[in-house]
Amino acid sequence: MRKILVVLFCLFFGIFQSMSQMVDPVKWTTSVEKISETEYYLISKAEIPSGFHLYAQSMAADGPIPTSFIYDDSEGNFTIIGNTEEEQGKTVNDPVFNMEIKYFEKTATFKQKVEVKRGVTTINAFVEYMICNDTQCSPPTEEELVFNFSESSKAVVANVALNTTLMSDSSKESKKGLLGIFFIAFLSGFAALLTPCVFPMIPMTVSFFTKQSKTKVAGIKNAIIYGIFIIIIYVLLGTAVTALFGADSLNALASNPWFNIVFFLLLIVFAVSFLGAFEIMLPNSWANKVDSQVDRGGLIGIFFMALALAIVSFSCTGPIVGTLLVEAASKGGIAPVIGMLGFSLAIALPFALFAAFPGWLNSLPKSGGWLNTVKVVLGFLELALAFKFLSNADYVLQLHLFERELFIAIWVAIFGALTFYLFGKIQLPHDSPLTHISVGRLSLGLLTLAFTIYMIPGLWGAPLNLISAFPPPPDYSESPYGVGFTKLENSSASVNGYTDLPEGAHLMAPHDIMAFHDYDTGLEYAKKVGKPVMIDFTGYTCVNCRKMENNVWIKPEILNILKNEVVLISLYVDDPKPLPKSEIREYSLRPGKYWKDYGDKWADMQAVRYSANSQPFYVLMDHNEKNLVAPVAYTPDVKVYQSWLKEGISKFK
């Protein structure tokens, strides 16, 4: 309706003849203002063309398009505090829209308070706006904003104390951050280095540079260039994946069941390849063509030497690179690029260093059967990870075909088989005869044996906190309360004093926390019983959501609050259940795109109300839908989370 009125307004004043002549759009500038060691203002300033006005953030349903901001906190590096503030502006009674409208002329400044954590250098945001004068309007426009925390503004947060923020431990626990992806990829690169396709190539590379370089200085220079070319080749691969899927849409892969099934099949192929069934290789003609260019010398020869390494070693590095790209792609943004940077850096460093200092080769262990052992161990790990993606798909679709017990049983079988392999009881096609077990192999075998034994009680309901993020949650299980146990017949009698669950509510096993999946139904119930509302923006495939539910919510002090002092509304942003036609709406911040399912509805709600799109995200509010305290995201510290809950409840009372 709003857009129809805007179009009528535009037609009335002949906008279509003059809109294209508008040459002075709004110019946006950003800055950061420090409040304390952890809190800052993100300041957005608009320079408005002469004679035009920019609309405020709050407009009636049938009014013009308001100015709106969305801050990208998908990495969990900061917390939005309150709403975006704006200046007083000018309020007039607009005859076209027949309502009071607030707008700004010449300039407008908007301020958003945030709480940041260690290592933040930039925060990205988007602003959508429309400007008008007495005769014409611009179409709704979206512009990207970047807030830089520079030393000149004293906004560097490297020394922020982690225990001063509600999200202080998330940098240690969450794998969503780019830094976490980088280090995982870096370690994966070292693992790839110890495979039979890559490790033996180090002496060959050293020999190449020793023969080609006339002096030691030239050898070091060429080795450094060689390492840089390796990094460039893999980073270009990550860039291609980002460009292919689109940086803004990659994170949707994590909750898409069909992509999860594709990833499952892909990782199964990688795992079987590592176990020795076959090799994934690029065409030999590629390697021959590249190898023919190596002797050209100079930078071109070094580049083709690096490209030859990537192609020849693909049978070992391909599955690892593929897995990294799958995992990084599900994080969104430039994660694939960062992942390939970490992976290639780990590959490039040893090659460059040994090429520069060939004498170090004497300290390397000799090639042998241990290289294939590394490859097989990686194959078992790939196999275990594959079933995580299959579990995601089943959980999102709620098919109940791959529940918690089956997942744990498969992992017990995989890591049990790995234990037998490490102890020499299983041999695979490319293994060398095992005459004795080394100390390292024995130690790793004992570790996997202990891990396998640890998982077995999970078949009978044990929480398995060490791997809580991987299997389905306890309530998605054949026996949610443990084998041989069922919910007491009158257990719901203790829930808010009612003998029967209210309409629209269910109990989350095994905690028996009453929760609503519909926002309006939950809010009405909260008003009825006189308790504050806790909104839980969550997701079926959200790893940190499961960690919170299994490691934090289960604690007695938290469980008592969630059961008895708040009304919990869990909104799944990846819920694939189709919306009724009567509820389908246009995205508030994505004109022209419409909701398809309940996940779209709740995700849009989170973005519009709280300028956030990461999960978990918790909100405590009163019956007027006003926040009692600032919302929080992933908070693994039980005491901090309890303090947040108590503060909100005390303000409600």
Image (cartoon, grey):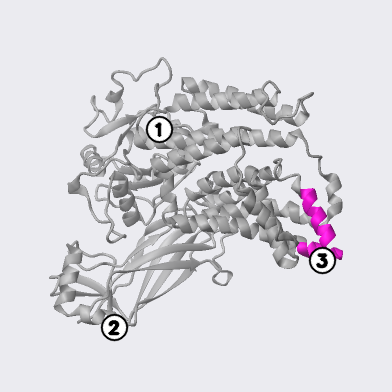
Question: In the picture shown, does residue 453 fall above or below 342?
Answer: above
- Viewer-closest of 523 and 51: 51
Residue placed under numbered mark 3 in the picture: 218
Q: Is residue 347 magenta?
A: no
Which of the two marks, 3 or 2, is nearer to us in this view?
3
Question: Where in the figure is residue 45, as x and y percent of width and height?
Answer: 39, 74
Residue placed under numbered mark 2 in the picture: 21
First in residue order: circle 1 vs circle 2: 2
Q: What residue type is disc 3 on?
A: Ala
Do labels 1 and 3 touch, CB within 8 Å?
no
Residue placed under numbered mark 1 in the picture: 559
Residue 423 appears left or right of 176: right
Q: What residue type is disc 2 on?
A: Gln
Q: What span is colored magenta in the figure?
A: 202-222
Secondary element type, mark 3 = helix
Residue 613 appears left or right of 161: left
Q: Quadrant of residue 6?
A: bottom left
First in residue order: circle 1 vs circle 3: 3
First in residue order: circle 3 vs circle 2: 2
Image point (75%, 33%), residue name: 369
